[in-house]
Image: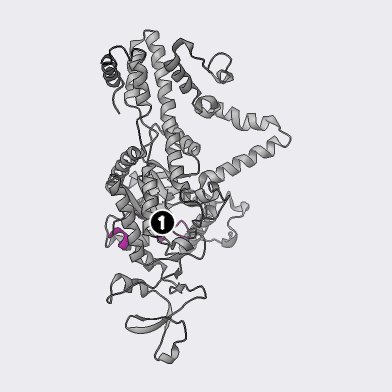
Amino acid sequence: MAAFNDERQALAQQREAQCGKWDNINPDHAARLRLQNRFRTGLDIARYTAAIMREDMAAYDADTSKYTQSLGCWHGFIGQQKLISIKKHFGETKGRYLYLSGWMVAAMRSEFGPLPDQSMHEKTSVPALIEELYTFLRQADSRELNHLFRELDNARQAGDELKSKELLDRIDNFQTHVVPIIADIDAGFGNAEATYLLAKKMIEAGACCLQIENQVSDEKQCGHQDGKVTVPHEDFIAKLNAVRYAFLELGVEDGVIVARTDSLGAGLTQKIAVSREPGDLGDQYNRYLDGDEITSADDIANGDVVIKQDGKLVKVKRLASGLYQFKPGTGEDRVVLDCITSLQNGADLLWIETEKPHVGQIKGMVDRIREVCPDAKLVYNNSPSFNWTLNFRQQVFDAWEAEGKDVSDYDRADLMNEKYDATPLAQLADEWTQNFQRDAAREAGIFHHLITLPTYHTAALSTDNLARGYFGEEGMLAYVSGVQRREIREGIATVKHQDMAGSNIGDDHKEFFHGEAALKAGGKANTMNQFG
């Protein structure tokens, strides 16, 4: 970002060149507007954030403690508040991203109303949310810089040169709230051409990283639901190519592709892969298809499909839906093949959708992948679809049992019971949960940890608490004590909601445009002043 004084001087020279026609334009004000609008287009954002992701990926390769994190979003305000909170509590945004969840878009943003995560929502709602997220993040920049400029005005008026210099330094070294967004393009919303067109819209809106999964577009399911149907690698590679072409066409050479595999929980495929010779990619995909060996044409009925599998003729098991089944217990092998194939064909990061958060399980697959692709890195879904409490209590139970410890005081199937909350087992399980991201980053190659739906759940929980009190005995005290007073005590900027919505920025603009005639909202009668 250019220095404030440099911008101001350049604009002053431009004003002078207009021979009086721009005398009403204050170079100081124009420079402020420029610095408050650092990113002109979504492509500016995509290029800037792609470079950040590449730097972070290199940093993780050198030191696995440098893993990154994000939280899912369904509204621009939610994303803005996350980044404001990160800057407030940690002083910088390094390594913290936003995740745009297809589940969240389907459930919260579709014109059809709440939908399951099955790619039934309008595909245009995804790039629209990316644009909205960055609009709010840029507004956070404008608001924070506006406060700094106001402080600078006051310091100058007071003749405090030391304070003025400090504020100019903070302005010139301002850290933007704009961070990478990992955006969910589901299974591509159609064929490869449809994927390419949607990818372009998402990149133009600012996305530097697109996550695409190997399910069939028109049969897509949430990764934690049953009935998932995968596609042959050739079909998936075509969509990886489509996304890469979209990045290259728009000049985002550092664009990041996350290839997600749902094969661990997917037992079905829509197609038998094309195989041209034994051992090729199609043959490797087909060898996992379930079926019965046949020795005679009499074993074949109408509609049966026969393939050659490991030198034998096999009648593939086909459901009434026309879908084909994979052999039971082949999920991990198919995941490893998917991941290696994706990395060898243009993907930058992997996403393995699992049924539980288990470092050992993930590590087992990643170790096999890294035998072929040593720099393989994962994005991992720390999903609210997992019962984290139960999973980790059961993991501790199993570990203790394997060590020969006495676990007779615990019922493994009932470990979610509140009676266990204060037990040593529960306390250790909480420690494992707390360390899960660090352990998985170190042991299992996870570069990025995300939670897909956190604010969906926090919004429901906080609203439930407020409604119970407000409509019950507490009345207005439920809001005052449970929300507003906590905002004040904890320094939450939204307590001044007028300012958050841009009221002070608008006042300054009015002064820029109208001078002394400006009719401003932030005078003595503004009740926002009650909050200091």
The one nearer the camera, 26 or 310, is: 26
Q: Secondary structure at mark 1?
A: loop
Q: Amino acid at mark 1?
A: Gly
Task: State the image coordinates of residue 238 (x, y, percent, origin top left).
Answer: 33, 61
Which colour assignment does the render follow? one colour
From what the image shows, is residue 219 above or below residue 24? below
Residue lying at 46% horizontally and 48% vertically, measured from the top left: 124
Q: Is residue 194 visible?
A: yes
User: Which residues lie in the magenta part?
Assistant: 340-361
Toward the viewer: 156 or 507? 507
> Looking at the picture, does residue 396 appear above or below residue 89?
below
Quadrant where the image shows the N terminus: top left
The answer to whether residue 496 is visible is no
Left or right of 66? Residue 457 is right
Check the picture and name the quadrant holding the C terminus: top right
Q: Is residue 16 above or below residue 439?
A: above
Spot occupied by residue 153 in the image (x, y as percentages of width and height): 40, 14
Question: Residue 104 appears at what percent x and percent y?
Answer: 51, 48
**Residue 177: image x %, image y %?**
40, 34
Q: Is residue 530 left or right of residue 51?
A: right
Which residue of the protein is positioned furthest toward the right in this rendering?
A: 473
Task: For label 1, count other residues whose C-alpha is less than 10 Å away and answer few (under 14), some (14-19) or many (20+).
Answer: many
At 39% from the left and 46% from the top, the residue drawn is 202
Q: Is residue 80 magenta?
A: no
**Residue beneath the point at 53% across and 48% down:** 110
Task: Find residue 11 and report its image quarter.
Answer: top left
Residue to which mark 1 is pinned: 188
